[in-house]
Image: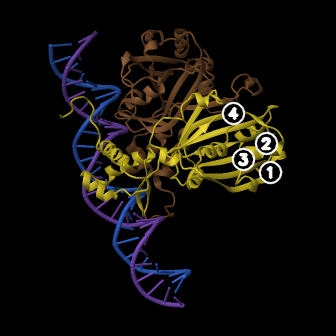
Chain colours: A brown, B yellow, C blue, D purple
Amino acid sequence: MANAVKTRVPQYQAVAATLRREIAGLPPNSLLPTELQLAKRFGISRVTLREALVLLEQGGLVSRHRGRGTIISPPKITRRFSPLYSFEQDLTEQGVEFETQVLSYEPEATPPEFIRERLRLPPGSAAGFLSLVRRVDSRIVCHDGRHYPPAIAARLRPERIEGRDASRVLEDLVGMRITAVDWESEIIPSSMETAAVLELSPGTLILANTFTYHVESGAPIEAGVISYRIDRCKFRYELPFSQHAEAEPPVPDAGRDSAAVTRGR
Amino acid sequence: MANAVKTRVPQYQAVAATLRREIAGLPPNSLLPTELQLAKRFGISRVTLREALVLLEQGGLVSRHRGRGTIISPPKITRRFSPLYSFEQDLTEQGVEFETQVLSYEPEATPPEFIRERLRLPPGSAAGFLSLVRRVDSRIVCHDGRHYPPAIAARLRPERIEGRDASRVLEDLVGMRITAVDWESEIIPSSMETAAVLELSPGTLILANTFTYHVESGAPIEAGVISYRIDRCKFRYELPFSQHAEAEPPVPDAGRDSAAVTRGR
DNA sequence: ACCGCTCATTTGTCTTGACAAGTAGGTATA
DNA sequence: TATACCTACTTGTCAAGACAAATGAGCGGT
């Protein structure tokens, strides 16, 4: 009303900042007041309030559900990367509960062209296709679409993946170690399919990792795309990867995520 | 039709998809029709059309400017990572024009606590603070906030950074090579300050990289945060990093970015 | 040539209002 | 008791309109 202050800062950003502070002191999974209540409290319209909530949701602080309400999210999990350091290995070392669910496996699927190139397959060649989703503490964090050359695809038993380390299974199958990775990361809007698997609205930004794994001879044995929910994950790299971990104190760092990460099994 | 499956697609998503296809065939830096024209053409309200444009903007396809219009963005640049592979080295090898601009340097600033911990400084200790922004093809891509231990900070000459490789300058200064990195990446809403430097609206998602560089003795000599605009960059990693580059063909990959990337000097 | 002004254009912010669709809990019915 | 339905509640989608703020082009004065 009668803009008392110069509206240099838009209301939806001011409200978002206020809510960010208040949320920081509330426990995860608790319910925020409804949009109408919040709009009334801040003296703004529901449309404007929703703009603020969108900012919070994009930042991973809350999740919103039609018919249920707005829920405060638990802290992000940390995915640590080292060369050839698998999802299973990482999460197991962190002592976090996780689950891998195979959605489908086709031994002779038709791969998209960029996968065919990465696997160095001739035009028209088929490839194995494995689709899976991963959960940490029962929350979906990523979706893998993995493709395999025909020789490997024929012998792959996807049911072996569920409980075990996918890369280790693959290495055992071919009898060689994976020694090289080509990895590209990009933030892009999710496709309809990926959004459905990750339980997101299509167009929501995700972290898409396009990768190729090679054995020592240089031959590619796996290629695909791993799509992470950026509202639930962050990523950590250490170089040189191997032993210098002890030169570092046990990762002092941020301090907000201790509750989720130091959970032990 | 009604709804064959439960897939009822909202109008703003359908419009976004249509515009995505049309934009793919248009040259970068060209102007889109105005919001009112587009809204009229699609037969929707301006509010709904704007929801579609927000999706395109978040995906990095267009940039919008009050008073000017909506402009189609050039393709993303690729930032390639290898251990201790600097921004300057990477972009130079790609033959892309870039510029580093020092915004400020304070030899004795008060660092935030998480920086103090990373540099292993006692409470209350000062640290050098360097703020800079990088441009590629005259477009802002990232903002660095770099902190240095007092002994280094006193001797650092920020004007030496502008034209040269920042890490190399630092190595020359201390007479040691950087051999270890600790690196954490997270997608977060931009702060007011970072948003201003990156010319973004506060709250826009950015890629925040929090890092610490160490010399061989294990001592940290630099720590800070590098914030990338995710609408302008993607990221590429290769492991093992060093020589196997030639085993790979010269990055066949996507195919859309050839125009911008092969610009050479 | 240069500077400052006005003004139409365009996107940014915000309001009120409406209906759709998913959720959860209670109620009626078998 | 168990099932189906009904209903209140909550977020999702969409509309039409209003004013603010930034831009850039045109105009006029110095």
Disc with the residue nearer the chain's start (2 vs 1): 1
Q: Name the residue under label 3.
A: B166
Q: Name the residue under label 4.
A: B182
Query: How packed is label 4: few (under 14 Cα within 10 Å), some, or many (20 or more)?
Result: many
**Of labels 2 and 4, the one closer to you:** 2
Marks 1 & 3, CB-CB < 8 Å contact: no
Residue A86 screen position, x and y as percent: 57, 20
Residues behind callouts 4 and 1 on a single chain: yes
Q: What residue type is labelled 2?
A: Glu
Q: Which amino acid does label 3 sit on?
A: Ala
Disc with the residue nearer the chain's start (2 vs 4): 2
Distance between mark 4 and mark 1 Cα atoms: 22 Å
Q: Which amino acid does label 1 sit on?
A: Leu
User: For numbered disc 4, what is the local secondary structure?
Assistant: strand
Quarter of the figure with the C terminus of chain A? top right
User: For numbered disc 3, what is the local secondary structure?
Assistant: helix
Query: How packed is label 1: few (under 14 Cα within 10 Å), some, or many (20 or more)?
Result: many
Distance between mark 3 and mark 4 Cα atoms: 17 Å
Residue A124 screen position, x and y as percent: 36, 23
Residues behind callouts 2 and 4 on a single chain: yes
Q: Mark 2 points at which residue?
A: B171
